[in-house]
Amino acid sequence: MGKRLSEDTLATFHDSLDRVLGCKDLFDVFYERLMSRSPSIASRFHGFDVARIKRMLRDAFYLEMMASDGNLRAATRLQDLAARHADLGITRAMHDTWLETLLSVVAERDPRYDEAVEQSWRDVMRLGMDFMKTGAPV
Ligand code: HEM
């Protein structure tokens, strides 16, 4: 596993996460925007319970944070999640779109969003994104 992130990065991420999770529409806006980015992304969600995925994603943010703080169980759960997404045929490019869309929503919802906050999100999400992209179709 890579180097653990600094306390500073983790704290910056955690504070931003706290602020944005306070927004009731965070997940609705995120998934609406993600699906509107491309019909092929939208089609991947057909037949799935998106309300459930929204709830699971909330928990996954904490998994990402724990995994990037060196927690192996959290890292293993992220690898399982990545394997499931690879099975669903979700491509690397879709994962890039996913992250950029997420950051665009966080930027609008976090009143203290700045370069350091953006970087903390990228740093914390990196391990999970690496897992996702390693097994993903191109
Ligand atoms: C455009 C990219 C993505 C698409 C199209 C997508 C699509 C999906 C779909 C269809 C499911 C339902 C799977 C099932 O019920 O078995 C799902 C579940 C989930 N996705 Fe994604 N996903 C994407 C990227 C990501 C990323 C980068 C994360 C990062 C954390 C993530 C987190 C989750 C979580 C936490 C679940 C719930 C898993 C569970 O049931 O335990 N997704 N996703």
Image (cartoon, grey):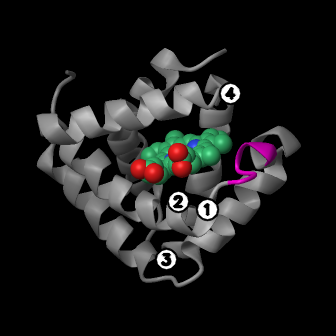
Q: Secondary structure at mark 3?
A: loop
Q: Is mark 4 within 8 Å of ligand 1?
A: no
Q: Are marks 1 and 2 in contact (CB under 8 Å)?
A: yes
From what the image shows, is residue 111 above or below residue 5? below
Q: Which residues are magenta?
A: 43-47
Q: Is mark 2 within 8 Å of ligand 1?
A: yes
Q: Is mark 1 within 8 Å of ligand 1?
A: yes
Residue at position x 21%, y 59% in the image:
11
Estimate how packed mark 1 is, as few (under 14), some (14 to 19) or many (20 or more) residues with alpha carbons within 10 Å. Answer: few
Q: Which mark is residue 111?
A: 3
Q: Nearer the viewer, residue 107 or 28?
A: 28
Amino acid type assigned to the residue bearing label 3 in the image: Pro
Amino acid type assigned to the residue bearing label 1 in the image: Asp
Q: Which residue is mark 2?
A: 53
Estimate how packed mark 2 is, as few (under 14), some (14 to 19) or many (20 or more) residues with alpha carbons within 10 Å. Answer: few
Estimate how packed mark 3 is, as few (under 14), some (14 to 19) or many (20 or more) residues with alpha carbons within 10 Å. Answer: few
